[in-house]
Image (cartoon, rainbow, N blue to C red):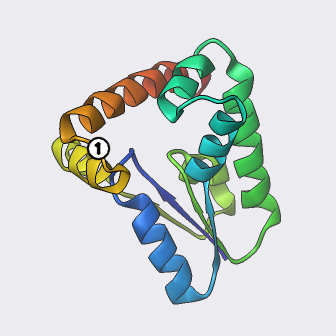
């Protein structure tokens, strides 16, 4: 079984994906974790790495390739990322999309990352602007 969980930052996708995987006895793969690992390898924050990816399309291609391989090759997994449902396409048995207003998402991110809400909101807006620019171009 392949279940995808997608949505913007702070929408609850990670929390729900982990709980869903636990409840069903499935593995869990987070595209956000993979992205953060890729950023850390380059000594960048996720926001910096998002903006860097605007100049280097190979970053998104590498992440997409990894996620697509998981969707195609692995069984019994909850795959969670912004585009998991789209990347998995017909391989997914179930696809979930989570969303919430930016104000709520910023509060969740601020609490999770121990930072002020206004900073979380600004960073989220920057990330989403960068992603929107790239996604419109690529997809």
Where is 54 relative to 13, above or below? above
Q: Quadrant of the C terminus?
A: top right
Q: Position of residue 31 (x, y in %)?
A: 60, 50
- The residue depicted at 52 percent of the width and 19 percent of the height is 51
- The residue depicted at 76 percent of the width and 35 percent of the height is 62
Q: Position of residue 50 (x, y in %)?
A: 54, 26
Where is 42 relative to 108, above or below? above
Where is 41 relative to 13, above or below? above
* Quarter occupied by residue 26: bottom right
- Residue on which the image places disc 1: 115
The number of discs equals 1
Q: Quadrant of the N terminus?
A: bottom right
Q: Position of residue 44 (x, y in %)?
A: 59, 28
Graded by Cα atoms within 10 Å as few (under 14), some (14 to 19) or many (20 or more), the crowding at tag 1 reads: few
- The residue depicted at 26 percent of the width and 33 percent of the height is 119
- The residue depicted at 73 percent of the width and 31 percent of the height is 61
Horizontal side of residue 113 vs 49, given as left or right: left
Where is 83 relative to 135, above or below? below
Q: Position of residue 19 (x, y in %)?
A: 46, 78
**Of 31 and 113, the residue lying toward us:** 113
Secondary element at image label 1 = loop
Horizontal side of residue 135 vs 106, given as left or right: right
**Of 97 and 13, the residue lying toward us:** 13
Q: Farthest residue in the top direction? A: 55
Q: Farthest residue in the right direction? A: 73
């Amino acid at each position: 079984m392949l279940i995808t969980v997608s949505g913007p930052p702070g929408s609850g996708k990670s929390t729900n994906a982990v709980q869903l995987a636990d409840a069903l006895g499935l593995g869990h793969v987070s595209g956000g974790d993979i992205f953060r690992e890729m950023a850390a390898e380059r000594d960048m924050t996720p926001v910096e790495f998002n903006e860097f990816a605007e100049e280097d399309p190979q970053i998104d291609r590498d992440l997409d390739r990894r996620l697509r391989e998981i969707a195609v090759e692995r069984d019994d997994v909850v795959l969670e990322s912004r585009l998991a449902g789209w990347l998995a396409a017909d391989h997914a048995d179930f696809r979930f999309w989570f969303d919430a207003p930016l104000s709520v998402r910023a509060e969740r991110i601020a609490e999770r990352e121990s930072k002020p809400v206004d900073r979380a909101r600004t960073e989220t807006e920057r990330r989403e602007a960068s992603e929107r620019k790239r996604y419109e171009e690529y997809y």
